[in-house]
């Protein structure tokens, strides 16, 4: 292993970088959602967390159901294509298993917060809150007068998570990380975070990264740890590695309507399992085979020898 290797197990990454009371971002826009990180955080029973994410779906519903979350910073809330997130709704409406504070933005508001955090700006201006009721619900959305004389404009504060977990296709052991497919705010979230844990399907040689540099979304210089966790984003998907497990999303909708059945699921699929390998073994090879993505290869390009 390279002496500069940042490769560590998920258990160690969570133990080292996730502290009680921390602000955590597990990003990925419908794809690349690191459920493996979420489950390990639940398993280690971290407490009083603030969760930030553009689109909280099952991953944060499960963490809220585990009773480890105090606050949610988000835009759009739901089980994509299915319906409500019943655990989050229960926490907000009934305080079960514990009360949950909400800090809501539009999609672009969250984009702006990450962008400001990544650039270390004091705020980010945007026009999308004109005529919106969100500023009444969220006092952190404020208005300032434009210095260029065109009237008031909304601003949002920077978002700098204590740690971001970013799932990707591949990285080298120094953390140079390549992602392709549906890219959300993974890059901005990584640059905004104080600590960055990259979780990948494959760990590859540095030479592989260098042969296709334009695919490197996150440079190793900002990465604190690399975790090799195949299928770590299941039941979401990773482009070219496995498809979205729609059966799991539908099943969660029915099961999570009741706190007792949710607790039973967490016990069976999280607390009773030592890690992701056991989760995959329990899921079974036949289920994973159903998620095979098929093949549609991109064309090679010639970078030339100049500067190589």
Image: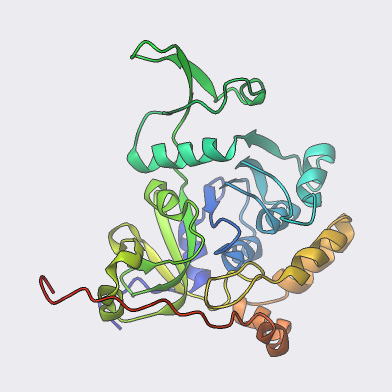
Above or below for 262 versus 131: below
Above or below for 168 versus 158: below
Residue 192 drawn at (x, y percent): 40, 46
Residue found at the very far left of the displayed protein: 306
Residue 211 drawn at (x, y percent): 26, 77
Q: State the quadrant of the N terminus.
A: bottom left
Above or below for 193 versus 308: above
Residue 64 drawn at (x, y percent): 71, 51
Residue found at the very far bottom of the displayed protein: 285
Decide if residue 134 is on the left or right side of residue 122: right
Q: How many marks?
A: 0
Coloration of the structure image: rainbow
Q: State the quadrant of the C terminus.
A: bottom left
Residue 118 drawn at (x, y percent): 37, 43
Q: Is residue 219 visible?
A: yes
For this rendering, which residue is in front, 157 or 129?
A: 129
Q: Quadrant of residue 102?
A: top right
Decide if residue 253 is on the left or right side of residue 295: right
Please report the residue visible at 53 percent of the width from the left and 50 percent of the height from the top. 24
Q: Is residue 4 visible?
A: no
Above or below for 67 versus 302: above
Please report the residue visible at 37 percent of the width from the left and 67 percent of the height from the top. 177
Q: Quadrant of residue 90?
A: top right
Decide if residue 172 is on the left or right side of residue 145: left
For this rendering, which residue is in front, 261 or 77?
A: 77
Q: Quadrant of residue 234?
A: bottom right
């Amino acid at each position: 292993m390279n002496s500069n290797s940042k490769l560590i197990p998920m258990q160690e990454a969570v133990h080292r970088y996730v502290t009680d009371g921390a602000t955590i971002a597990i990003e990925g826009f419908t794809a690349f959602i690191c459920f493996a990180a979420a489950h390990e955080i639940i398993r280690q029973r971290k407490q009083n967390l603030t969760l930030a994410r553009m689109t909280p779906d099952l991953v944060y519903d499960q963490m809220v159901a585990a009773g480890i979350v105090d606050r949610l910073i988000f835009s759009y809330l739901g089980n994509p294509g299915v319906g409500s997130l019943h655990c989050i709704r229960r926490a907000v409406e009934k305080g079960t298993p514990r009360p949950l504070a909400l800090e809501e933005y539009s999609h672009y508001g969250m984009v702006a917060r990450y962008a400001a955090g990544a650039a270390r700006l004091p705020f980010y201006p945007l026009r999308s809150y004109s005529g919106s009721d969100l500023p009444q619900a969220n006092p952190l959305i404020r208005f300032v007068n434009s210095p260029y004389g065109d009237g008031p404009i909304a601003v949002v504060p920077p978002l700098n998570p204590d740690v971001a977990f970013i799932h990707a296709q591949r990285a080298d052991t120094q953390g140079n990380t390549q992602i392709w497919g549906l890219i959300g705010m993974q890059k901005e979230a990584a640059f905004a975070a104080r600590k960055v844990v990259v979780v990948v399907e494959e760990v590859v040689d540095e030479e592989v990264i260098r042969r296709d540099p334009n695919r490197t979304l996150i440079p190793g210089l900002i990465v604190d740890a690399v975790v090799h966790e195949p299928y770590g984003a299941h039941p979401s998907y990773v482009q070219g590695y496995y498809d979205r497990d729609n059966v799991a999303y539908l099943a969660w909708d029915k099961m999570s309507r009741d706190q007792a059945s949710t607790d039973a699921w967490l016990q069976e699929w999280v607390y009773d399992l030592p890690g992701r390998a056991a989760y995959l073994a329990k899921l079974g090879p036949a289920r994973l085979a159903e998620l095979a993505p098929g093949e549609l290869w991109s064309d090679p390009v010639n970078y030339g020898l100049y500067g190589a």
